[in-house]
Every structure is written in structure tokens, then in C-alpha cells.
């Protein structure tokens, strides 16, 4: 019996990495009956007679489990954010950050296409990036496209992690991966296609080695990911609000209409991003409305 990690799945075959090599395996027959589906990223116990033939005996406990892409043990996400005026949206960025906070996955924000910006717009984005850093998020940004220092920062962030890239179509996900691992040759525009393909189509999912980390070759989430949380819990996923809310007068304050709210005070004092608060309000309403529609249907 060996222990390894599933690095690729394709048509019922799982390539398991153990002691420096890959073993092609299948799931044990009774997995289907027990409704166990091994996922890329899983740590597994397996038996093999040759590297071409083996069986997964047991899937070890998962830390996290993503649905899109179906990858286990993802603990980091590179949020590829296109910074051009046509593409940039704090709303999308905040939506992605909330989705990651809910999933318990650490974000690294990568600001893409900065080479296309005027100095003035670059300065605006840099100010915003500093505000996200003050919240506690790592932001990778450089005036030049794919600056070596930026690529090094991402590689260092990836070390020891299983990661996904996320970001809207055309944000620059494939291009970034190609720069992080020259020779990878991902066709640009290719990876979102994999995401949009039907749920039941068999498709290949693999973890790519980049420096000392692993990155899924299929992007994570989508920009329309719904928040599967209660509206009054949304505040827990804004780290800067969590820190302030101890000073709100009311326990369970959602920082909207309550008096003596520390978040609204900090906002009025210019200590918090207005754009992020606006997004918070919008997400709050979205979640509330979603619940109403859901209840009506029942
Ligand atoms: N100037 C400039 N162009 C970039 C940069 N990053 C990506 N691009 C271009 O933006 C376009 C889209 O990039 P992709 O890497 O295909 O984007 P993607 O996020 O993988 O897109 P999907 O696969 O459709 O989700 C390509 O033409 C890239 O060459 C950048 O930093 N600077
Ligand atoms: Zn409050």
C-alpha cells in the first residue's frame, strides 16, 4: 500500500503522484456503491503492481472540496483581475473575495494588464491595491507586464499550496500561467471553455506543478457564484468589518441601519473603502432577495 496525491483525472483513471512518480489507477469497485468519487487533489491510499495499473483503496479526509472545478484540498486562489477601464470592477473583485472567504480559501490578488494603463489610472489602481493590502489581502501588482518580481511573488505564495486561478473570461488567467511556467503552452482563452462545458461531460482536470506549488488547469468559481449564506452573516466575510464590529453598539450589527455602528463611523471617517461598502450593501440585498424568491417557489 502506498499513499499519494491524485494529480489528474480522466475518464475514470486517476494519476496518483507518490515517491517521485505517477501511477495510473482506478477507483475500487465499491466506491460507486458507497458514492465516493475521488477528486484531483485528494490524498489517497492505493495499491499498484506497475505504474500503469493500480487501485485506489481509500480517499483520505479532505480539507476543502470545490465543485467548480472539482478539486479537493484547494487552499489558495489567484484572483486574476484585469485592471483596464473596460474590464476592472471592484464589485467583481469583492464578490470573488467573499466567495473565497466563505470557502475558507486564501486569496492572492493579481492585477493583470497594468501595461495597458496610463500613469494616472495605474496610480488609481495602486491606491486601491494598497487599501486591499491594508485589509490583509496580498496584492501582486507591477507597472510592467509579467515583471520577474511579480512572478516570483506569486511563486512564493504558491509554495506548498494547492491553488486555483479565478477571474472573468479574458482577464489573463492562461497567459499568467504560461508566464509562471514557460513551456506550459496553455492556449489563451482555453481554460474557461473547460469550465463552461456541460457538467456531465467527462473532462480532464489536472494539477500543474508551478515552482513548489500546484495549480488546477481549470479555473475556479464563476463571477456569478451565488452566496450560499444568510444576509446577516455576510459581514463575517469582510475581514475589516469583523475587526471593527466589536465596537458596534449592537451585537449582530449588520452595519446598515443600526445606530452607533463602528463600521459606518469608520466609513464616514474615510478609513474604509466606499466601493467595498457599496458592494457589501448590494450583496446583502442580493442575498435577501434570493431568499424571498426561494421561499415563494416552495
Ligand atoms: N497587454 C496585456 N495583455 C494581456 C495580459 N494578460 C493577458 N493579456 C491578453 O488578454 C487576452 C486574454 O488573456 P487569456 O490569458 O486568454 O485570458 P483568460 O482569463 O485565460 O481567458 P479565458 O480562458 O477566456 O477565461 C489575451 O489576448 C492575452 O494576450 C497583460 O498583462 N497585458
Ligand atoms: Zn456595525
Image (cartoon, helix red, strand yellow):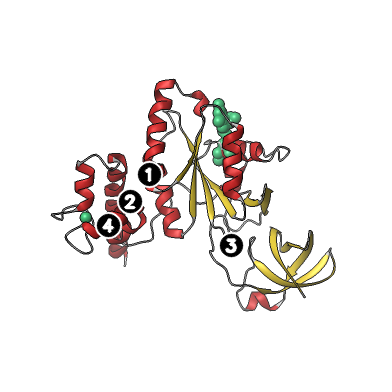
Residue at the spot 61% in from the left edge and 33% down from the top edge: 148
Q: Is residue 91 in view?
A: yes
Q: What is the distance, in whole Å, between disc 4 and disc 2 at their CAs?
A: 22 Å
Q: Nearer the viewer, mark 4 or mark 3?
A: 3
Observer-nearest of 149 and 229: 149
Q: Earlier in the sequence, mark 4 or mark 3?
A: 3
Secondary structure at numbered mark 3: loop
State the image coordinates of residue 208 (x, y, percent, origin top left): 68, 50
Secondary structure at numbered mark 4: helix
Observer-nearest of 127 and 224: 127
Image mark for residue 288 = 4
Secondary structure at numbered mark 1: helix
Q: Are marks 2 and 1 in contact (CB under 8 Å)?
A: yes
Q: What is the distance, in whole Å, between disc 2 and disc 3 at their CAs?
A: 28 Å
Q: Is residue 290 in view?
A: no
Residue at mark 3: 72
Image mark for residue 216 = none
Image mark for residue 240 = 2
Q: Nearer the viewer, mark 4 or mark 2?
A: 2
Residue at mark 1: 134
Q: Are marks 4 and 3 in contact (CB under 8 Å)?
A: no
Q: Earlier in the sequence, mark 1 or mark 4?
A: 1
State the image coordinates of residue 267 (x, y, percent, origin top left): 23, 44
Question: Can you say whether 39 is above or below 145 in the image?
Answer: below
Q: Earlier in the sequence, mark 3 or mark 1?
A: 3
Q: What is the distance, in whole Å, between disc 1 and disc 4 at their CAs?
A: 29 Å
Amino acid at each position: 500500500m502506498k499513499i499519494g496525491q491524485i494529480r489528474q483525472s480522466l475518464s475514470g483513471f486517476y494519476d496518483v503522484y507518490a515517491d517521485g512518480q505517477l501511477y495510473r489507477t482506478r477507483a475500487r469497485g465499491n466506491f460507486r456503491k458507497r458514492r465516493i468519487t475521488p477528486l484531483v487533489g485528494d490524498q489517497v491510499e492505493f495499491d499498484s503492481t506497475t505504474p500503469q495499473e493500480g487501485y485506489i483503496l481509500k480517499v483520505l479526509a479532505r480539507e476543502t472540496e470545490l465543485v467548480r472545478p472539482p478539486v479537493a484540498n484547494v487552499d489558495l486562489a489567484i484572483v486574476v483581475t484585469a485592471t483596464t477601464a473596460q474590464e476592472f470592477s471592484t464589485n467583481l473583485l469583492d464578490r470573488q473575495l467573499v466567495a473565497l472567504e466563505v470557502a475558507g480559501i486564501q486569496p492572492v490578488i493579481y492585477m493583470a494588464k497594468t501595461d495597458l494603463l496610463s500613469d494616472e489610472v495605474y496610480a488609481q489602481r495602486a491606491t486601491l491595491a494598497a487599501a486591499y493590502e491594508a485589509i490583509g489581502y496580498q496584492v501582486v501588482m507591477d507597472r510592467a507586464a509579467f515583471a520577474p518580481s511579480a512572478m516570483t511573488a506569486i511563486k512564493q505564495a504558491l509554495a506548498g499550496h494547492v491553488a486555483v486561478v479565478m477571474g472573468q473570461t479574458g482577464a489573463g488567467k492562461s497567459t499568467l500561467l504560461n508566464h509562471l511556467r514557460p513551456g506550459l503552452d496553455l492556449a489563451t482563452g482555453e481554460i474557461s471553455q473547460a469550465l463552461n462545458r456541460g457538467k456531465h461531460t467527462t473532462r480532464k482536470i489536472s494539477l500543474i506543478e508551478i515552482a513548489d506549488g500546484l495549480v488546477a488547469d481549470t479555473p475556479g468559481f464563476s463571477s456569478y457564484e451565488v452566496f450560499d449564506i444568510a444576509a446577516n452573516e455576510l459581514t463575517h466575510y469582510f475581514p475589516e468589518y469583523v475587526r471593527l464590529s466589536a465596537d458596534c453598539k449592537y451585537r449582530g450589527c449588520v452595519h446598515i441601519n443600526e445606530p452607533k455602528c463602528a463600521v459606518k463611523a469608520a466609513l464616514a471617517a474615510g478609513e474604509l473603502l466606499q466601493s467595498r461598502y457599496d458592494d457589501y450593501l448590494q450583496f446583502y440585498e442580493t442575498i435577501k432577495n434570493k431568499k424571498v424568491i426561494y421561499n415563494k417557489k416552495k
